[in-house]
Amino acid sequence: MGVAKGADNGRSGAARPVPMATLERLSTYLNCLMQWERDGVGTVSSATLQGQTGVSAQQVRKDLSYFGEFGRRGKGYPVRELREALAGILELRREQVLVLVGVGSLGTALLAFPEWKAYNFRIGAVFDIAPNKVGRRVRGHDVLPLDALPDAVRQVGARIGMVSVPPQAAQDATDALVRAGIRLILNFAPVSVQAPPGHVVRNVCFVSELAVLSYLAQSPACRKAEPKGPPAR
Amino acid sequence: MGVAKGADNGRSGAARPVPMATLERLSTYLNCLMQWERDGVGTVSSATLQGQTGVSAQQVRKDLSYFGEFGRRGKGYPVRELREALAGILELRREQVLVLVGVGSLGTALLAFPEWKAYNFRIGAVFDIAPNKVGRRVRGHDVLPLDALPDAVRQVGARIGMVSVPPQAAQDATDALVRAGIRLILNFAPVSVQAPPGHVVRNVCFVSELAVLSYLAQSPACRKAEPKGPPAR
DNA sequence: TAGATTGTTAATCGATTAACAATC
DNA sequence: TAGATTGTTAATCGATTAACAATC
């Protein structure tokens, strides 16, 4: 039931499964390291990462330990090396090609997102069903009809699909991606969509996040999700 | 360390803390129920919810049990009542007023999001620093300067703030919200931001989600996050 | 060396799943 | 009643935290 056996980078001997929670934190670390690298910072400690992310220093070290040994005792982690290592773990040293289904206002905002390049993502093809959108050019991308999906996916080598269509259309869009051979799907529509075994659907649902905040608003329970301990920086 | 003591709806006697994981699933259930209510469905079982959400039936029942007893044994859950109960638990029977900082393409897409009303959210005020945006009207909202935040927050009664500014500006925007008395913050910028104790920051980070998918792409580990068991529908 | 900080093992805590009694 | 399905208690599993030895 471990998510990712055998993903241990060849370093850590036996294949411990990597907790999903760890995986979800990795890109946060990567993001900090990218910034520090731009700033010319040479070394950081797990305490520095705690200060920046709110994740406890020991948790940071534990997370990294699933993939190998990246630090120097008494010193900390070399920023550039750790950044490269994390990018490698997340398969972001090779370009990841995405396809996008749905070019409404959210889809258009996604096309304009300035950080794709920094993470080595590229949107390879863009689709919509609306006849008045198909054939147009949006933010430098030709909008293709949905039935062009299978060919386009093969052509651009996409492995990940993003769904940004209205809720009623989300399952259809997902099905189309599945038929086109896409096994990794990021759903932005505020409904749950299902895909067959062997596929992974993850959701970006801000309504859900807001609902959690709304819940927390009622009691003085706001004392969760805070940075803990002495922030070092 | 429990997130939400005393949130037990007055029904369940002692105040069991509600797991964050449960909280995060609640809006998924709510979403399904809203759809079913529109479709005129009278009753659903936990197995139905499993079929629609991928969350196991027993997990659904366990989640609901933190807040009370909503079902009828042998029968299932009355759609309308359960929807109302969940909306109440999430404090969504009263209107939740939001403020938005940052009216770039993502912010604009958020303003255009059609489902705010359905969840009883309302964007009460909108802010930006860019002089060429302040004073303009975007999707029916007047864009205000950041220093209008404290007054506006009081005036519209906002309790939740959304940050959709470029990464470099995200911490500043967060600080401005904090100074304006906002304690619940949803950050859309792909950086981690910090807020003082007593505040909650949650993040919507699709880069993070994509990074997880990218990781999962490498091994045949795609056999996670699937619907399990016999879907009933 | 002494101080700092990592990496790891053990202990705790929390969340999910299994089992089943309650009851419609 | 019999069948179905809930709600709850106990058992398992997974993730976080604490403690500490290793070592730069």
Image (cartoon, coloured by chain):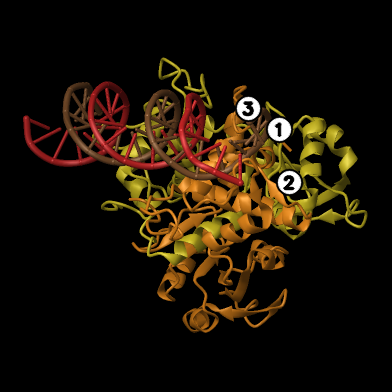
Chain colours: A yellow, B orange, C red, D brown
Q: Nearer the viewer, residue A94 or B208?
A: B208
Please indicate whether residue C5 sits to the left or right of residue A149 in the image.
left
Q: Are marks 3 and 2 in contact (CB under 8 Å)?
A: no
Q: CA distance from mark 1 to mark 2?
A: 13 Å
Which chain does tag 2 point to? A
Q: Which mark is residue B35?
A: none
> Mark 3 — residue?
B222
Label 1, on which residue? A159
Residue B196 falls in which quadrant of the image?
A: bottom left
Q: Nearer the viewer, residue B152 or A122?
A: B152
Instruction: Please report the residue visible at 70 percent of the width from the left and 79 percent of the height from the top.
Output: B137
Local secondary structure at mark 1: loop
Q: Tell me if residue A31 can be seen.
A: no
Task: Give residue B116's position: percent from left, percent from top.
Answer: 67, 66
* Tag 1 and tag 2 share a subunit: yes
Q: Residue A113: x and y, percent?
A: 65, 54
How dense is the environment of label 1, judged by Cα within 10 Å: few (below 14), some, or many (20 and up)?
A: some
Q: What residue is pinned by disc 2?
A: A163
Q: Residue B53: x, y in percent?
A: 65, 42
Determine crowd level at label 2: few under 14, some 14-19, many 20+ residues with C-alpha closer than 10 A: many
Please tell me whether mark 2 sits on a helix, a strand or a loop: strand
Q: State which mark lies toward you, 1 or 2.
A: 2
